[in-house]
Image: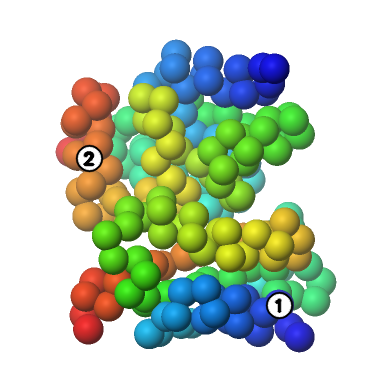
């Protein structure tokens, strides 16, 4: 049986190179951890789609089940779960996030 | 038992860490969504453990998340994690 929320998530992360499931929007993050990841992506000049899970409770629970990851934000690059705030920040600091973007042919600056 | 003590006990039992720091940062999130009036809602956790050797960051966090599933589903609103092997931590 297909789960409609999972189908939506799959569609989102397939149609967009970089997707951030977050609290609030990229312009107005509602959580410090979400804001931190928006900052990392913005610093790298990465174009991404922000999905505000606060406006949709089914998505809020669904994304946690989808990735088997209990917290938000969650970053996906080319359909693949990359991690949450700590992981994204660590990866960016060590140049590993840039490498992932390069390997997956996603445009960024720096 | 406090939430912090429970977290320490579960992580110590599950990962046998050589270093473990569970820091309650709830006061820094007062008034923020998910903040609990009695604190113990936001934690910063640093773990150095042999168990992380050969594991990716996502795998390491999943190990911690699994051990703390009950806390994450309840009182704990946010958790900042640093997961290092003894080598990465500088011995």
Q: Quadrant of the C terminus of chain B?
A: bottom left
Residue sitting at x 66%, y 84%: B5
**Separation (CA) of disc 2 from disc 1:** 37 Å
For the question of whether residue A26 can be seen, the reply is no
Nearer to us in this view, A25 or B45: B45
Nearer to us in this view, A46 or B77: B77
Residue sitting at x 44%, y 14%: A15
Q: Where residue A64 appears, x then y in whole percent?
A: 62, 41
**Badge number at residue A72:** none
Q: In the drawing, does residue A3 fall left or right of residue A110?
A: right
Q: Quadrant of the N terminus of chain B?
A: bottom right
Whether B13 is drawn above or below B60: the answer is: below
Whether A56 is drawn above or below B32: the answer is: above
In this rendering, the label closer to the viewer, 2 or 1:
1
For the question of whether residue B12 can be seen, the reply is yes
The residue carrying pointer 2 sits among few (fewer than 14), some (14 to 19) or many (20 or more) residues within 10 Å by Cα, namely: many
Q: Secondary structure at mark 2?
A: helix
Q: How many marks?
A: 2
Whether A1 is drawn above or below A56: the answer is: above
Whether A2 is drawn above or below B29: the answer is: above
> Looking at the rendering, which quadrant does residue B67 occupy?
bottom right
Q: Report if the CB atoms under discs 2 and 1 are less than 8 Å apart.
A: no
Chain letter, disc 1 residue: B
Q: In the drawing, does residue A13 fall left or right of residue B85?
A: right
> Looking at the rendering, which quadrant does residue A43 occupy?
top left
**Badge number at residue A98:** 2
Residue sitting at x 69%, y 65%: B71
Residue sitting at x 30%, y 72%: B85
Residue at the right extreme of this rendering: B37
The residue carrying pointer 1 sits among few (fewer than 14), some (14 to 19) or many (20 or more) residues within 10 Å by Cα, namely: some
**Badge number at residue B3:** 1
């Amino acid at each position: 049986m297909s789960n409609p929320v999972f189908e939506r998530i799959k569609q989102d992360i397939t149609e967009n190179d970089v997707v951030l499931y977050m609290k609030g929007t990229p312009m107005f993050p509602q959580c410090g951890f979400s804001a931190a990841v928006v900052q990392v992506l913005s610093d790298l000049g990465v174009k991404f789609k922000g999905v505000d899970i606060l406006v949709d409770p089914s998505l809020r629970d669904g994304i946690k089940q989808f990735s088997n990851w209990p917290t938000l934000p969650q970053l996906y690059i080319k359909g693949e779960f990359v991690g949450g705030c700590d992981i994204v920040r660590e990866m960016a600091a060590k140049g590993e996030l840039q490498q992932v973007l390069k390997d997956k042919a996603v445009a960024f600056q720096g | 038992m406090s939430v912090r003590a429970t977290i320490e006990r579960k992580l110590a039992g599950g990962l046998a860490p050589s270093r473990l720091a569970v820091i309650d940062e709830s006061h820094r999130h007062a008034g923020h969504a998910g903040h609990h009036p009695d604190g113990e809602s936001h934690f910063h956790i640093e773990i150095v453990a042999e168990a992380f050797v050969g594991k990716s960051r996502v795998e390491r966090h999943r190990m911690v998340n699994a051990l703390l599933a009950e806390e994450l589903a309840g009182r704990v609103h946010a958790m900042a994690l640093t997961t290092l092997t003894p080598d990465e931590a500088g011995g």
